[in-house]
């Protein structure tokens, strides 16, 4: 079915000074252990993301989303980002690695590690959806 262009809602935001961090919690270890740990993964992610949320508050970083094994946060989305804000994001990344090591290293938890990427500079983000 054709989509009526007048009913499409567009929302976009651009920034030349934002910094975004994307962290992906990665399952490690032998395949048999990874499969056996599947039932515990959601509980583990809940613990990890709760700690990440605390880090966001501590560093004045805005959580954007957590979806599956990926957690996204940013600074400077609504204002100019200072070097201190970008530095806070870097410090948060180091603390996120420590959190994952602590929680994932406890006996009985699945083997996990974290991959973290940071982008600083020009970016555009948005939502395209049908209006209700």
Image (cartoon, helix red, strand yellow):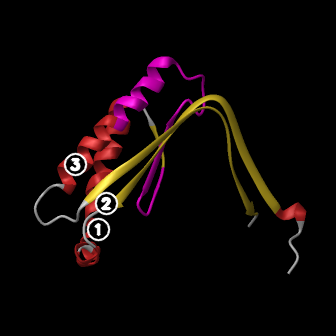
- CB contact under 8 Å: marks 3 and 2: no
Total number of numbered labels? 3
x, y percent for residue 51: 28, 46
Secondary structure found at label 3: helix
The structure residue drawn at horizontal position 81% and vertical position 61%, both measured from the top left corner, is 8
Q: Which mark is residue 41?
A: 1
Q: Residue 75 location in percent, x, y?
A: 51, 32
Residue denoted by label 3: 101
Mark identifier at residue 45: 2
Which residue is at the far top? 83
81 and 113: which one is in front?
113
4, above or below 21, in the image: below
Front position in the image: 23 or 64: 23
- Secondary structure under the numbered disc 1 in the rendered image: helix
Quadrant containing the C terminus in the rendered view: bottom right
Q: Nearer the viewer, residue 82 or 37?
A: 37
User: Farthest residue toward the bottom?
Assistant: 1
Q: Characterize the local packing of mark 3: few (<14), some (14-19) or many (20 or more) Cα atoms within 10 angstroms.
A: some
């Amino acid at each position: 079915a054709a989509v009526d262009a007048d009913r499409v809602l567009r929302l976009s935001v651009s920034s030349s000074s934002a910094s975004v961090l994307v962290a992906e919690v990665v399952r490690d270890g032998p395949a048999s252990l990874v499969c056996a740990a599947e039932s515990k993964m959601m509980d583990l992610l809940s613990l990890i993301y709760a700690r990440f949320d605390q880090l966001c508050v501590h560093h004045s970083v805005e959580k954007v989303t957590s979806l599956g094994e990926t957690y996204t946060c940013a600074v400077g989305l609504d204002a100019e980002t200072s070097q201190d804000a970008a530095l806070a994001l870097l410090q948060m990344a180091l603390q996120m690695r420590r959190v994952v090591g602590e929680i994932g290293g406890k006996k009985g938890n699945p083997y996990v590690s974290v991959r973290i990427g940071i982008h600083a500079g020009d970016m555009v983000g948005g939502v395209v959806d049908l209006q209700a």
